[in-house]
Amino acid sequence: MARHKDDRKQASREAILKRAAERFRREGIAAVGVRPLMADAGLTHGGFYAHFASRDDLVAATLEYASEATLGYFREALATAPEGQKLERLISTYLRPLHREHMGLGCAVSALGPEIARQDPETRQRFDVRRRGLVALLAEHLPEGGQPEARLDRASIVFATMMGTLQLMRIETDPAVVERLVAAGRQAALRLATQPWPAA
């Protein structure tokens, strides 16, 4: 009986996090209230505190959840990429029209970056652990060479290029310009990722 209750509680928490992750990315963190979010998940408002200590706790947990889902998605994409093409697969999977069109299911950093920067330090720290996971995944597929810190720094800049391109794609209303941004962003990110490492 206790196991069943725990499973049901975990399922409810997952439902809240899934809906919050979609709505935060699509509408913004500040725009989503707890009451309508709980209703979205098919739960009562009164049950919120059985899962989260506060709204800040919900925000942090949701950002963790969204980032973990994104990381899992890219790991799956890499798993089917031929050897020698994994870096290109990662960049092209991130920079594609489908990612532009489905903000509620995409990268939380791109969708919520400015709002995340305004969150309390604990929330930012909890989220940043997951963001670093994405950067580390990118760093794993950079060309050989470079010190570990330098590899992570370069991966961060490549990721920033991808993220900025995606944001421009979402702002742009002309489909032809979006296509050009996709191509130029992929090319720029790949060039940054593969440029020679400085001599020691």
Image (spheres, rainbow, N blue to C red):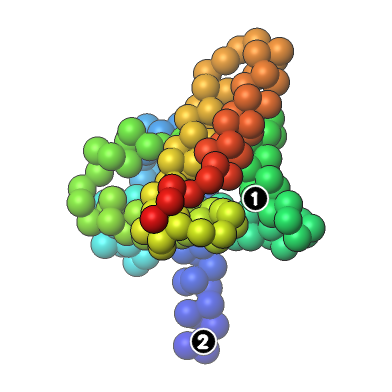
Residue pictured at 43% horizontal, 41% vertical = 157
Q: Residues within 10 Å of mark 1 (few under 14, many from 20)?
A: many
| Rendered image quadrant of residue 75 | bottom right
Left or right of 34 in this view: 125: left
Left or right of 32 in this view: 162: right
Foreground pick, 2 / 52:
52
Provide the residue designation for mark 2. 3
Disc ID at residue 35: none
Of callouts 2 and 1, which one flags the residue occurring earlier in the amino acid sequence? 2
User: Label 2 sits on what residue type?
Assistant: Arg
Q: Residue furthest left?
A: 121
Q: Give the secondary structure at mark 2.
A: helix
Discs 2, 1 touching: Cβ within 8 Å: no
Residue pictured at 33% horizontal, 33% vertical = 114
The reply to whether residue 113 is in sight is: yes
Task: Work out which quarter of the rendered image holds the C terminus and state it.
Answer: bottom left
Q: Position of residue 82 (x, y in %)?
A: 79, 58
Q: Position of residue 98 (x, y in %)?
A: 69, 34
Q: Compared with residue 41, is residue 192 higher up or lower down, i.e. above or below? A: above
User: Label 1 sits on what residue type?
Assistant: Leu
Provide the residue designation for mark 1. 87
Foreground pick, 187 / 59:
187
Residue pictured at 49% horizontal, 42% vertical = 159
Q: Position of residue 45 (x, y in %)?
A: 38, 52
* Mark 2 or 1: the one toward you: 1
